[in-house]
Image (cartoon, grey):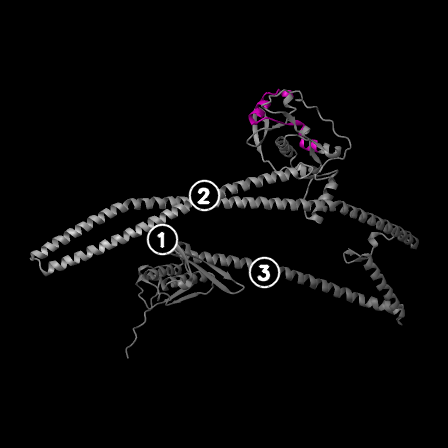
Amino acid sequence: PIGPLGAHVEMYPVDDPDEMQRRIHIVQAVLGRNMSSFLVHSSRDQSVLKDLMRRKFNITINCLQFAHSSTPFRVHANPFENFRVSDAHGPLIRVLDMFHIRDNNAWIYNALVTASNPERQFAHGTLSVAKNFLSGLDEHRLRRVACVYTFREPNGLFRVSKKKSSISGTPITQHRPILQSDTKQQQQWLHQRLNEKQDEIHVAEQRVRALQMLVNQHNVRLKEALKLLAATTRQIKSLENKIGTWQRRKSDLQEEQEDNDEMQTRMSELNNNIDDEKVSIANVEEELAPYEQQREEVLQQLNNVKREMSTFEHQVQDAKHRHQSLRTQYQEMAAKLKKDKINLDKIPVKIQELETRKNAINQEWNTERTKCEELKSAAQETGDEVTPQNYPRNGKRAFSLPALQKERKKMQDQIAAYAQESAPPEDVRRRFLTIKPKYETHQKRVQTTNHNVDQLQLMCKNKRKELEAMKQEVQKQLSKEFALIMRTQGHNGKLKVDFEAQELDMEVHMKSHDGGTRVVNTRTLSGGERSFSQVALIMALQKFSGSPMCIYDEFDVFMDSVNRCNSIKILLKAALGCDPSEIQKKNATLRPSDRQYLFITPNDISPMLAEGSEDLMSIHQLNPPRKA
């Protein structure tokens, strides 16, 4: 195998680096995944190579299968070699003329030409120029053109093709340039991206510093305005204190002597002073109004600046993160390239080891084959050939060679032991004929017993499956019955039964006052709700009970009137043979009940009588207790 094939593809040199960059992107788009593929001769080589790379290096590779050849294919001449194009539209280049194969390897050349068809793909102009070029071709020339890639499109690389009368351009994702004998072009591209991101970060940092300076200036102005506001506030408080003092003095003077002219004069003076102070306060407030408006504007500007600063900080963090991500990708790619190079360097050594191991296996196989031939010739000399039907077997399977040797040794030991016995062969044969019928009889009994044991185990297994299915069905029906009874009052719930731990878990969804439902623990329920839930649980359980009598003793003691009335309705209809799913219906179907219900309650029984069916009920009322 040869690969990856992209390592054998070299670009023809071009003076303009931008044009070289565009050519690299076009060739990479045309060759596609074949650049990272390995070239193999047959499907067997492909499976062996994939299995080797997966087991030894834990990687999956792409393979391109093509018959080995030493003569390059003869391709058609460029039909547009003498085609005159405008200088503004750029050259018209065939993709096959942009690259060549290193060392003129005919096998790689033929495989890539056959798989990617670069001789029928061209590069020319912008998107509109490429479309006009395809639309102007006649049918004879159009058969020689598969598609046209844009060569000078500012919005990226497009693949322009014509299907029937429709011409469309498909955008092509531009990958990192890898078609170079070294990594200079790739490193140059990565450094260019890195410099662009660093320039963006530098510009963002400058803007942040300018915003910080603006924020500092606004903070200084804000501090000055706050100081002025504090001084004005203190002055207002002082004037208010003076006003309060004058008003208190005025009230004192009015109380002491209202008719005194002298006091009236002082009062008038005080009033004048108060009016003057009020006028001064109004003046101060008018002077303070612009500062208040200015303070609001400064605060608004400060908030805007803070938002802009936060936005720029986020942009800076994103740029730093992208920069770090690019750097990490670059480092990972470099490490991966080194690791791939090391792995590729190991492949020839591994192939040589496999060749050595193959030669050793072939040598061992030849040695074993010689031994087998010798054993065969020796076996033929010992007597007639033993057919596979006459081979000794270990039950249903044939003996292996070590097992045959062990069995042979065991038989030899038995023969030697028999030879040492004092009994003559006639006595041994007679004892054998006597014991054989008993042995066969016992063997049949053992087989019959084993068969019965297997059948019993199979029956136990089936019964266990049926028991598990029955448990699941009982749990499902029990939860369904409980939910049906709870829904009669707008509630809901379900039951979970753990037969192994012998536990029953009850989950209750109680209807709230606002019409919704809430999941609550049974410990947090009220007395009436808990009693109703217990009644629903008992009614759900009694369907799976074969008891002919159900006795409810003081079931309604802790219930309120609503829950008690509803519980009595449900219990009476169940006692009269109504199905739980039809309890809420007024005209529910009543069937003869298979059990008798007894209700013991200290409360009023009028709700029971209100339900009707007195002929089916028997009421026993105890006498009141005797007083001492």
> Residues under labels 2 and 1: Cα distance?
58 Å
Q: Is residue 122 in the magenta section?
A: yes
> The disc labelled 1 sits on which kind of residue?
Gly
In this view, the residue farthest toward the bottom is: 628
Amino acid carrying mark 3 in the image: Arg
Is residue 161 one of those drawn in magenta? no
Q: Position of residue 384 (x, y in %)?
A: 90, 53
350 and 211: which is toward the camera? 211
Q: Secondary structure of the magenta portion, mostly?
A: helix
Residue name at image x 23 percent, y 46 percent = 283
Closer to us: 412 or 228: 228
Residue 96, quarter of picture? top right
For mark 3, give the secondary structure. helix
Which label is found at residue 210? 2
Q: CA distance from mark 1 to mark 3?
A: 45 Å
- Residue position for label 3: 464
Q: Earlier in the sequence, mark 1 or mark 3?
A: 3
Residue nearest the observer in this picture, 45 or 155: 155
